[in-house]
Image (spheres, grey):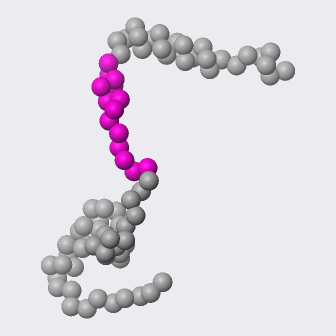
């Protein structure tokens, strides 16, 4: 791992780096590394970082009786059959 010193950083840039790093929960060092990698095209896209919304229309769409029926079925499936565990 190489160490690099950056000289001549003005107060405005230093403050912006500090506040941005804090907002992202990173150290200033990590923020600068991330910014450099991004600007140099070295950041790899995370394979499973996409968010999907294809089931959003189902959220909150069950009526109370439908939820009870589904929940009851799930609870029945969770029962342990003592005969299988002898």
Chief secondary structure of the magenta span? loop
Q: Residue furthest left?
A: 12
Location of residue 43 with respect to 29 vertically, above or below: above
Horizontal and vertical percent position of residue 21: 29, 68
Residue shown at the point (41%, 88%) measured from the top left = 3
Residue at the right extreme, as displayed: 86
Picture residue at 40% right of the left edge, 64% below the top: 44
Q: How many marks?
A: 0
Q: Is residue 5 above or below residue 60?
A: below
Q: State left or right for residue 83 relative to residue 53.
A: right
In the displayed structure, does residue 59 sit left or right of residue 68? left
Locate residue 77, reporting x and y percent: 61, 17
Decide if residue 65 is in sight here: yes
Q: Which residues are magenta?
A: 48-61
Quarter of image, res 64: top left
Q: Is residue 58 magenta?
A: yes
Q: Residue at x 35, y 29 (%)?
A: 55
């Amino acid at each position: 791992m190489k160490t690099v010193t950056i000289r001549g950083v003005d107060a405005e840039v230093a403050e912006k780096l500090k506040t941005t790093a804090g907002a992202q929960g990173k150290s200033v060092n990590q923020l600068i590394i991330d910014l450099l990698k991004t600007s140099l095209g070295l950041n790899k896209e995370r394979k499973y970082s996409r968010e999907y919304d294809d089931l959003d229309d189902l959220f909150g769409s069950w009526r109370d009786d439908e939820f009870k029926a589904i929940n009851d079925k799930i609870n029945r499936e969770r029962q342990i059959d003592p005969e299988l565990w002898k």
